[in-house]
């Protein structure tokens, strides 16, 4: 069994000390930086865009996992690729021509992901599962950090795992929203490969240690 990955969400970082927080993640056991882009249209909040991501990239040493919570993401794929994204994830709900957007991302040479909201069934991924590198299960309604994990997401992770097994793809299952030490083990047992954690990391007393603890979960079982 391959070890799971930890992707701290910078949305919960201290933006007045962003460089300090990025360097902390660089030195930690985290695998990726999870970057939440919000446009105030697809979700009821606005975060940051490609210019900030480009500046973050200059001081970071890890994979940039860009989660686009925006309408018409096809307009911005090139810009986020140029800003330094290693993975771009778009929302199923924001893409009437999802297959085309996935191809656009892959044409840049980076990895492509598709996210689904809590009320969107896993079955909508069936016709793209062989095309994507990552599928993201939103375990809160997107737009804000610090929300409560929606329990139903565990069943969706299991369904997604079944879909991946059916098509024998190597698609990673990423879970985003309300994930922390209190539920990470259950999320992993359901089949998750990548844990996104915002508040659980940045609002904890010792973020580096929290990351290490999340990373070491399940180690004994697989040792
Ligand atoms: C929510 C974002 C998440 C968020 C997670 O819209 O996609 O990535 O930052 O934050 P926590 O871990 O605090 O729920
Ligand atoms: Zn996210």
Image (cartoon, grey):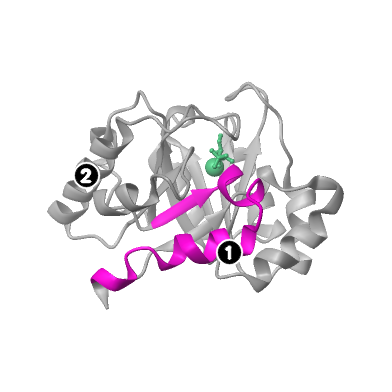
Residue drawn at (53%, 48%), measured in percent from left and top? 197
Residue range corresponding to the magenta coloring: 194-221
Position of 136 relative to 124 (above/below): below
| Residue 52 point in image, percent of width and height | 78, 50
Q: Residues within 10 Å of mark 2 (few under 14, many from 20)?
A: some
Q: Position of residue 107 (x, y in %)?
A: 50, 59
Residue found farthest to the bottom: 223
Say few, some or many: other residues with alpha carbon within 10 Å of mark 1 (under 14 / 14 to 19 / 20 or more): some
Residue designated by label 1 = 209
Q: Which residue is mark 2?
A: 158
Q: Position of residue 9 (x, y in %)?
A: 60, 49
- Residue at far front of view: 205
Q: Nearer the viewer, residue 9 or 89?
A: 9
Instruction: Examine the structure image and report whether residue 199 is included in the region drawn in magenta.
Output: yes
Q: Residue furthest left?
A: 166
* Observer-nearest of 130 and 183: 183
Of callouts 1 and 2, the N-terminal one: 2
């Amino acid at each position: 069994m391959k070890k799971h990955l930890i992707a701290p969400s910078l949305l919960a970082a201290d933006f007045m000390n962003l460089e300090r927080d990025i360097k902390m993640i660089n030195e930690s056991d985290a695998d990726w930086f999870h970057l939440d882009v919000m446009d105030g249209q697809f979700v009821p909040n606005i975060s940051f865009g490609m210019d900030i991501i480009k500046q973050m990239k200059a001081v970071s040493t890890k994979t940039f996992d860009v989660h686009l919570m925006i309408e018409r993401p096809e307009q911005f794929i090139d810009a986020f690729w140029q800003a330094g994204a290693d993975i771009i994830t778009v929302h199923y709900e924001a893409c009437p021509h999802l297959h085309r957007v996935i191809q656009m991302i892959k044409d840049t040479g980076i990895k492509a992901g598709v996210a689904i909201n809590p009320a969107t069934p896993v079955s909508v991924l069936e016709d793209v599962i062989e095309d994507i590198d990552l599928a993201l299960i939103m375990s809160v309604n997107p737009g804000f950090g610090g929300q409560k994990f929606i329990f139903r997401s565990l069943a969706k992770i299991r369904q997604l795992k079944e879909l991946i097994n059916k098509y024998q793809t190597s698609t990673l299952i990423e879970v985003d929203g309300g994930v922390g030490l209190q539920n990470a083990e259950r999320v992993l047992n359901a089949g998750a490969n990548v844990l996104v954690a915002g508040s659980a990391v940045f609002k904890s007393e010792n973020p580096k240690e929290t990351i290490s603890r999340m990373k070491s979960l399940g180690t004994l079982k697989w040792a």
